[in-house]
Image (cartoon, helix red, strand yellow):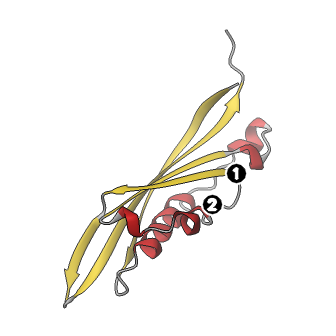
């Protein structure tokens, strides 16, 4: 079997007042996953729990993201998450606005014809 990518989703999330990187990251993942209804599991007859969901979020301070909390945004599947340098930290009236960007790939292990 080979891991085969079926979809890529992108999203953006913010925390306007709390300077919470995890909250912004979770919102970015939610935005990416809930833009579309991905029906490929049903269309191809794959169980949803076999979906491989790889999450990458870009934020100004990746070490401040709780990746286990971010993974909870995926409703099913085998989920991995990583945080990388990206997004934006913006100043707003003495506070910080945190912007996170997420990219999510959805794959399945499938057999390929030789």
**Relative to 63, is 54 above or below?**
above
* Rendered image quadrant of residue 63: bottom left
Question: For residue 77, which numbered disc appears in the image?
Answer: 1
* Rendered image quadrant of residue 90: bottom left
Q: Position of residue 96 (x, y in %)?
A: 26, 82
**Relative to 36, is 13 above or below?**
below
Q: Residue furthest front?
A: 63
Q: Which residue was labeled with disc 2?
A: 74
**Relative to 25, is 6 above or below?**
above
Q: Position of residue 102 (x, y in %)?
A: 43, 57
For this view, does 66 lie left or right of residue 50?
left
For this view, does 80 lie left or right of residue 111?
left
The residue under the point 71% across, 56% down is 76
The residue under the point 26% across, 66% down is 88
The residue under the point 32% across, 74% down is 98
The residue under the point 62% across, 31% down is 3
Q: Position of residue 108 (x, y in %)?
A: 67, 37
* Rendered image quadrant of residue 52: top right
Viewer-closest of 76 and 37 = 76
For this view, does 47 lie left or right of residue 66?
right
Viewer-closest of 101 and 45 = 101
């Amino acid at each position: 079997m080979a891991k085969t990518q079926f979809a890529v989703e992108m999203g953006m999330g913010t925390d306007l007042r709390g300077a919470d990187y995890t909250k912004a990251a979770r919102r970015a993942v939610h935005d990416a996953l809930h833009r579309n209804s991905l029906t490929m599991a049903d269309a191809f007859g794959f169980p949803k729990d076999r979906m491989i969901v790889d999450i990458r979020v870009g934020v100004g301070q990746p070490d401040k993201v709780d990746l286990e909390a971010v993974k909870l945004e995926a409703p099913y599947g085998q989920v991995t998450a990583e945080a990388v340098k990206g997004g934006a930290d913006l100043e707003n009236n003495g506070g910080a606005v945190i912007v996170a960007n997420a990219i999510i790939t959805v794959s399945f292990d499938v057999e390929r014809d030789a």
